[in-house]
Image: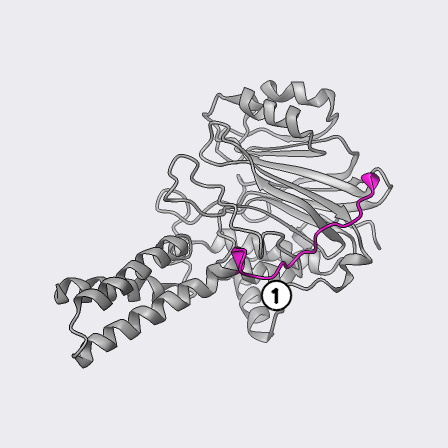
Amino acid sequence: MTAILTFFTTLACIVTLLPFSRHPHWAIRGMDFPRLQFAIFIAVLLIANFVFLNKQSQFTWVVISITALCLAWQLWWILPYTRLWPHEVKETKESSPDKQISIMTANVLTPNRKVDKLIQLVQIHKPDVLVTLESDQWWEDQLKVVEVDMPHSIKCPLDNLYGMHVFSRLPLSNQEIAYLVEKEVPSIHTTLTLDSGDKVRMHFMHPAPPSPTENPQSAERDAELIIVAKSVAKSNQPIIVTGDLNDVAWSATTRLFRKISGLLDPRVGRGMLNTFHADFPFLRWPLDHLFHSQHFTLNSIKRLPPIGSDHFALLTKLTLSPTVGADQTGLESNTSDHNWAKEITENQSISVNDVPQVDNSK
């Protein structure tokens, strides 16, 4: 039993220590994803070490101490996405309807044909904006019905799992589809006008994930995240960034995105809202995101019922409340963060000027 528990403690150390490396290889970056699962595994292992190992042995206490440190480190990353943590974004107290915006973010899975499930959710929740990811020409054709209530749209149908569509009840301007890092992976950038007349800068993203079947490294994904972060950091305009970022909320790279951009995460203190994988309850993590500037407070954020995809859709309702939200703060950056961000973008030979300028505040 000692040998078995020692082996699993060594394994716990490996999965805990690997993400310390900033190497972008998928096998290393992938260790960021299942931190909740790792934490559960290590917690069970810690109990087993207490129960089965000889507590008179100094070696036992070394093993227990190492296991406890691994558990503490995993929890440090995921606890902000539990109700044990303070809210990063304030709740909306008094909401003016003309300053509200609701956004449904849905990775539909290209071969999925259960479009009626998504349309039903749109009819029930009546979002102001629907963004679909992995939507090809078939999905575009099927979703024409939503254009009755959402007449403003930006369409980029692709059959490579990176198609993207935006449908909006509210007017869109300065629309641009950009291929920031990879020539077949688009992002959409636009300005949305609320009923109040206020302008909101919108960025819809779906960078390719690091994986053995797509990009062997996370370099391309990381560069797209950071270049958008740098772009929005220069703006004083209300900003929303949403999409399937193929990165978990608690990873070092998503945290770097938040530090550089200054954007807030409404999930902090409210729950993980794991949107992937819809078919495997024990293998889920938050891949679909919505970040926003301090101009907004939160009405609600929730994961929606399944739509036949491997992702759940995410519905977020915000209110433009610049005065109330003025003292909201997220993660703060330091010199090391900016140096890392610079290294990431320079390695992909891209600059902040590559991001479409949809800022109306200047």
Task: Specify the amino acid type for callout 1.
Answer: Leu
Residue at horizontal 36%, vertical 53%?
37
Main secondary-structure element of the magenta-colored stretch: loop
| Vertical arrangement, residue 76 with respect to residue 285, above or below | below
Residue position for label 1: 331
Q: Give 190 or 199, whichever is nearer the viewer.
A: 199
Direction right: furthest residue? 197
Numbered range of the magenta stretch: 80-98
| Dot 1: element | loop
Looking at the image, residue 42 sits to the left or right of residue 125; the answer is left
Magenta highlight on residue 82: yes
- State which quadrant residue 234 falls in: bottom right
Looking at the image, residue 67 sits to the left or right of residue 142; the answer is left
Residue at horizontal 48%, vertical 28%?
110
- Specify whether residue 138 is in view: no
Crowdedness near tag 1: few (<14), some (14–19) or many (≥20) residues, C-alpha within 10 Å: some
Residue at horizontal 78%, vertical 50%?
359
Magenta highlight on residue 32: no
